[in-house]
Amino acid sequence: MRQKTEQKRDAILAAGKALFLQQGYEKTSMAEVAAKVGGSKATLYSYFSSKEEIFSAVMQASAVKEIAPSFKKLDAHADVAQTLSQFGVNYLYSTLDPEILALRRLAQSEAERNDIGRKFFNQGPKIGWQMVESYLKKLGDSGQLSIDSPWRATMHLKGLLEAEVLDVCLLGVMPRPDKTALKVIVDEALAVFLRAYRL
């Protein structure tokens, strides 16, 4: 019974995601999601209380599937430069996935009208970057890097990694680079970061 329930929930999220990407958040209704799944609105409401809740769950599921693995591979006992290089390439490649970018645009466009933007940040990026903060704190505590504020260092790393590609991909100026091109971008960003934080 549990497996069937999870399958139904996944089907609802898949339907919601398809509709959000196809016609936007505002134009998507609970009735349309229910129709696409092939069930009743009553069944839909037994899983999610609102369209906003479905969207938040879609964002969270996408982040967990595409982006979270990059953060989970941070190992304070491994070589710092190599670990951060692998993290940076995997993080950017996942973040710049066309579907992830499309969902991010929707979250940003709705941020002033509801809590979608806040929920997206708290359920996705915030958790991931707190993991980086913890990783950098360990490097600072072990003397591998000189870090007074782990969170500030985390934001510096994030800014350097994203600076060359995020806005231009988010705005459709250029397509997602392949991993070879991203490695060049990441390694140059890390050179700046490590010059600032190496002992």
Image: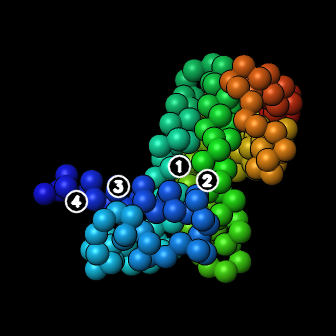
Q: Which residue is mark 1?
A: 63
Q: Amino acid at mark 2?
A: Pro
**Relative vertical location of residue 195 with respect to residue 27 in this rendering, above or below:** above
In space, the residues marked 4 and 2 are separated at their CA atoms by: 28 Å
Residue 158, position in %: x, y? 74, 44
Foreground: disc 1 or disc 2: 1
Quarter assignment of residue 110: bottom right
- Callout 2: helix, strand or loop? helix
Q: Residues within 10 Å of mark 2 (few under 14, many from 20)?
A: some
In the image, residue 153 sits, relative to residue 43, either above or below, namely above
Q: What is the spatial separation of the Cα atoms under label 4 and label 3, in whole angstroms?
A: 9 Å
Of label 4 and label 3, which has the lower sequence position? 4
Question: Which circle, 4 or 1, is nearer the viewer?
Answer: 4
Tag 3 near tag 2, CB within 8 Å: no
Q: Are the two marked residues, 1 and 2, in contact with CB atoms closer than 8 angstroms?
A: yes
Measuring from the top left, give residue 89's x and y in whole percent: 67, 29
Q: Secondary structure at mark 1?
A: helix
Identify the residue under disc 2.
Answer: 125
Q: Which residue is pictured at 71% across the width and 69% down the height? A: 109
